[in-house]
Image (tube, rainbow, N blue to C red):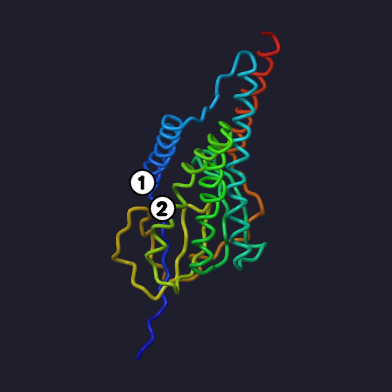
Amino acid sequence: MKEKKINTYIFEYKMGFIMILSFVLLIIPILITWAYYKFTNAHLNINIDEPSSIIYSVLLFILMFLWMILHEIIHGIAYHVNGAKKENITFGAALEKGIFYCKCGEFINKKNIIISLLSPFILIGVITLIIGYLINSFVLIFLSIVNISGAAGDLAMYSFFIKQDKDIQFKELGDSTTFCLKTKDDLSKKKYLSVKLKKVVTDEKDIIEEKSKKLTISKASWILLIVIIIIILLDIVALLFV
C-alpha cells in the first residue's frame, strides 16, 4: 500500500472567534464565583478604603501583567520538558494585538502541543482559582479569572489539535498568531471555528524563518508600556498630594 505523502499547511487564528471565546471564559468563572459566595458561608472581602485603593489597584495591575508573563513562561517550560530545544523557544509581546506569546520555532508532536496549550490554563487558572476560593483570596481569584479568559487562544487551538491525527508536527511562525502544520491528512477543504487555512505550502522556504531573539517586543508595545508606566507614576504622585 502506497504511503500517504506529508502535507504542509499554514494556519492563522480567527481572532474574532477568540475574542468572543475570551469574553465567554471571563463571564463563566465570574458567575461561578458569584454562585460560590452566594450559596456558601464563605465571605470575600474586597472593600478597599481610600487612599490605599489607588496603590492596591496599581499593584493589582502589575500582578496581572506578571501573571500574563508567567502564563507564557509555563508554555515555554512545557515545550522544553516535552522535547523542544531551549534555543528554539522564544518569547515576545505585541500589545497592539493584545498578546504576549511563547513561540516554539521547531516542529513538535501532538502530545507536546496539547500539554503546552493546557498547562497555564490548568496550573494558574483552574487550580489557583480553586485555591483562591479555599483561602478567600480576591487577588488570586481575580488573577485566575484573568488567566482563564486569556487562555482563549490556547483552548481554541486545543479544540483544533485534538481533532488532528497523532502524526501531526507543529511549528509556530511570526508572533505565534500563525503556525505551520505537517500531516498526512488532507486539511485543505476542512473548516474550523478557531483557525483558518492561510496557505498550502508547496515550497519549504515559506516556513523557514530567521532565528528569533530570545525576547522580542514590538515598537508599539514599548510605546504602550511607556504610556502605562507614566500613568502609574502620575497616579502615585497624585496620591502623595492627597
Residue 12 image-quadrant placement: bottom left
Find out whether the residues at labels 2 and 1 contact each other: C-beta distance under 8 Å: yes
Quadrant location of the N terminus? bottom left
Which disc is residue 69 wearing? none
Q: Residue 85: x, y in percent?
A: 65, 66
Depth check: give the residue in front, 176 or 44: 44
Q: Secondary structure at mark 1?
A: helix
* Most distant residue in the front direction: 41
The total of numbered circles placed on residues is 2
Against 81, residue 75 (above or below) is above
Name the side, left or right, on which 211 lies relative to 196: right
Give, as a three-letter code, the residue at label 1. Phe
Q: In 3D space, how far apart are the residues under numbered discs 2 and 1 (Cα atoms)?
A: 9 Å
Residue 195 image-quadrant placement: bottom left
Residue count near mark 1 (Cα–Cα under 10 Å), binned few <14, some 14–19, many ≥20:
some
Location of mark 1 (residue): 17
* Most distant residue in the bottom direction: 1
Location of mark 2 (residue): 156
Which numbered disc flags the more N-terminal residue, 2 or 1? 1
Q: Residue 112: x, y in percent?
A: 54, 65
Q: Residue 76: x, y in percent?
A: 61, 56
Give, as a three-letter code, the residue at label 2. Ala
Depth check: give the residue in front, 149 or 189: 149
Quadrant location of the C terminus? top right
Depth check: give the residue in front, 191 or 94: 191
Residue count near mark 2 (Cα–Cα under 10 Å), binned few <14, some 14–19, many ≥20:
many
Against 140, residue 187 (above or below) is below
Against 119, residue 61 (above or below) is above
